[in-house]
Image (tube, grey):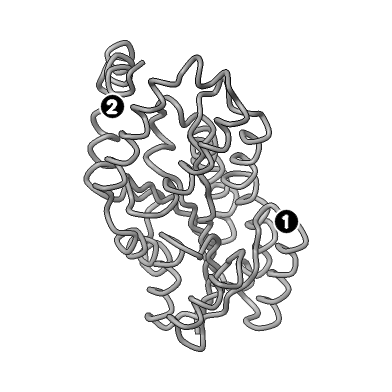
Amino acid sequence: MRSVLITGASTGIGRATALRLDAAGWRVFAGVRREEDAAALREAGSEHLTPLFLDVTDAEQIAAAAATIEAQAGGLDGLVNNAGVAIPSPLETIPIDDFRRQIEINLTGQVAVTQAMLPAIRQAGGRVVFLSSIGGRVALAFTGAYHAAKFGIEAVGDVFRQELRPFGISVSIVEPGSIDTPIWERGERTHDEIGARSPQREALYGKAMEKYRKVIRDTAERGIPAEKVAKVIEHALSANRPRSRYLVGLEANFVARVQPLIPTPIFDRIVARSMGL
């Protein structure tokens, strides 16, 4: 039975991927942070789906997850680096600890988990998938920390692909557009908490941030289901010739092809108009 570890499996893309691969006969290790999320996965999945408490910023939990996988599965056929957060805020006013947190979870944690799992992946001749985003190609105002991490994932994925190629380990980067997941709703709540700690933000960017809230809500409403991304991840893990990159959704494909053709000053004016800057 093929085995896979999926980080950030409590909700959204991670949960959809865990349940899809479980239904396809994989032995799934699903990284979660709360017991209620573990219980929900156990109820929804089969006996072959095992929730693991895994905070990708916690070295001890990463080591414990690697030990559990080694004991229960031996090798690891797939790793899906999915865990992530999105906390919107202007770069000028975001508390630096909140900036660091996004980089730590969305980027550094992915490298730490991959390092820890590579012995098991190498043993099984497995594969690695990184969840990036169209936001790893195109950056927009008020989401700078998120974009910085996703641009970094693009580089990390490329370098791992090059370095692991001699060992027969394929690495794919999945780049969805807008997805119907709770990540932006959670980010909006955190955004309010940051605002309370950063009065300068409201003075400088208050009106634009209110318009940005509407942009985010509209984006979330038109997001594609997480299950569509899960299907692409399954392809990256199972296909005879997996792609190095997968753009997922019409929005992602459109933006990736059109944005490079737009002169930067014009693109910036488009962003300014949509964001109220």
Which is more toward the observer, 189 or 44?
189
- Give the quadrant of the C terminus: top left
**Residue 91: image location, x then y, percent:** 54, 23
The residue most toward the top is: 265
Question: In the rendering, which numbered label is found on residue 259?
Answer: 2
Secondary structure under tag 1 reads: loop
Residue 252 — which label?
none
Q: Mark 1 packing: few (<14 Cα in 10 Å), some, or many (20+)?
A: few
- Image position of 119 with respect to 2: above or below: above
What residue do we see at 75% from left, 57% from top? 59
Q: Residue at x 39, y 67 (%)?
A: 16
Q: Which mark is first along the chain, 2 or 1? A: 1
Q: Residues within 10 Å of mark 2 (few under 14, many from 20)?
A: few
The residue under label 2 is which amino acid type? Gln
Along the horizontal axis of the image, is 28 left or right of 101?
left
Q: Position of residue 214 (x, y in %)?
A: 31, 34
Q: Which residue is mark 1?
A: 58
